[in-house]
Image (cartoon, coloured by chain):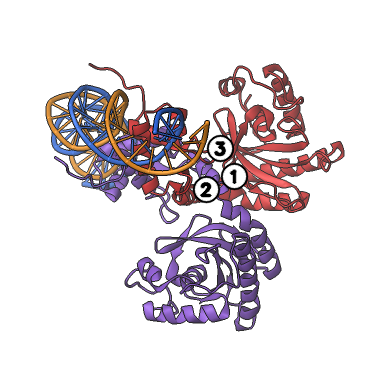
Chain colours: A red, B purple, C orange, D blue
Amino acid sequence: MTKTQPYRGTQAVLRAIALLKVFTDARPQWGLSDLAQAVGLNKTTTYRLLTALESEELLERHAETDTYRLGLGMISLGGYALRANDLRALCQQELRSLAALAKETAALELLTGAEVLILDEVTGDRVMSGGQAIGTRWPVYATSTGKAMLAFMTAAEVTAVLPPQWLPLTPHTLPDHAALFADFAQTRARGFALADEELEIGLVAVGAPLLDFDGRVVAAISLAGPKTRLGNGRIAEIGSLVAAAARRVSIHLGYAPDVVINK
Amino acid sequence: MTKTQPYRGTQAVLRAIALLKVFTDARPQWGLSDLAQAVGLNKTTTYRLLTALESEELLERHAETDTYRLGLGMISLGGYALRANDLRALCQQELRSLAALAKETAALELLTGAEVLILDEVTGDRVMSGGQAIGTRWPVYATSTGKAMLAFMTAAEVTAVLPPQWLPLTPHTLPDHAALFADFAQTRARGFALADEELEIGLVAVGAPLLDFDGRVVAAISLAGPKTRLGNGRIAEIGSLVAAAARRVSIHLGYAPDVVINK
DNA sequence: CGATTAAATTTCATAATATGAAACGCTGTT
DNA sequence: AACAGCGTTTCATATTATGAAATTTAATCG
């Protein structure tokens, strides 16, 4: 029987990872039975997997409530993962100056699948941070960074990344591919992308892509703040700050600014 | 055959976790063969485990060099783990004010085994941070937080935690149990622990424990900076800042300050 | 260039190991 | 007291992980 296996690697490990991924900001705490149901596994199997994860501190369980949470081992590994990222180190100084100059929150984000992942965040210290949201993911099509990255990719790449359709997150979320592609043109003309209450009401952000030696999109950086502070008057100023910073980093990545952008 | 199995949970999962834990700040990048050897697994087995971890983005591999690093999924999970920690949320404001007041780096640390784990860190912004070292672990006996926690635990608990002996990290590292216990007495009298170049030459830190409703040690907070700034003149001042902050948090945890400390 | 490593990858037979149904025990609820 | 929901243990089964060996790939060197 030469049946190709439907999973990559080791089944038990994939199942364990599936369990871990169920823990999110929205639901950081789980009991055994709920978990088993959530990932569609037998309760006994789930129990054993959890036991393994717990014994290595990737999960911890609260004795009283008999519920699991992500554990200290996870925090350690996350820290190592973060610090192993060269791009983050490369951008840190730029993020700091951006945040300091604009007095808004600066972020570095990567594209993964149809989402952007926050790799680093430096708050402007006007408000008290809000959320150190490193590791959080947002849909590409509703973020300044996401739109900035897509705008500098080929149409083929973009359609490969984007879901065929999506539900709007706010009344201002761009509704479809057509609207997005129109936005990309503006973004390229401007030099930065603008997400004006498209992700969340009251939140405005501008983003610019980081390009490597090949002119390929690597990541994006952004500045974000409340609509009350980031009115139309300040967009151009903030936008050019971000674009300039992105350009400086891109040059570090070997990007040659005079080369024609592919697309 | 009622042989008790030598591992807890699922073997394959434990092996996968062992692989993950090999990735550290000191060695963030590994090739397959090295990994297999490091954890003592067959190369094929290692290969399959890595494949699973990679397919779920807990690891990523650099195409050119054929080496693995911790991946984006790890960053996400680490972020969730961090944000699921109530203690961290509870202390964040105190850490900020400490860092701002003292213009030094404030940290919140937990005890795990014979090590402290940095759960949060707020830099004083005088120097440019140094290291966002969240998730990093240090030996209890050479840190202000570690010594602060031990000083408020029972002798039995302390000896259970401490290794029988250790190698000094600097010429000032306390050499053995006796020296540590003497230090605990001072710590209790002072209200805070002092680590004066015991972990690293040039680094001075003061720490105080967080106690819960039972008077039991939960964690510790600290202020740390270079010896050049934290000379003997400033220790008392900085120390009482930390002790006061720790006390405020402890009260939030239900600690009743007038109750006699167990020990 | 061909030879020589060293490394990653695939194959395949084997049985060790993960699996899940069922039974058990515990706790709180009606 | 009976019930319901949950975590835990047991145990027979074969699925699934395993590792030795063979194969491919890439890099290094004579």
Q: Chain of mark 3?
A: A
* Residue at mark 2 to residue at mark 3: CA–CA distance: 23 Å
> Which quarter of the rendering shows the N terminus of chain B?
top left
Q: What number of labels is visible?
A: 3
- Camera-side residue: A210 or A40? A40
Q: Residues within 10 Å of mark 3 (few under 14, many from 20)?
A: few
| Pair 2/3: label in front | 3
The disc at residue A82 is: 2
* SS assignment at label 1: loop
* SS assignment at label 3: loop
- Report the residue marked by disc 3: A27
Q: Position of residue A118 (x, y in %)?
A: 60, 41
Mark 1: amino acid: Ile
- Report the residue marked by disc 1: A134
Asked if marks 2 and 3 touch (Cβ < 8 Å), the reply is: no
Mark 3: amino acid: Arg
Looking at the image, residue A87 sits to the left or right of residue B96; the answer is: left
The disc at residue A19 is: none
Q: Position of residue A168 (x, y in %)?
A: 70, 23
Residue at left 71%, top 25%? A184
Query: Is residue B242 depicted above or below A86 in this figure?
Result: below
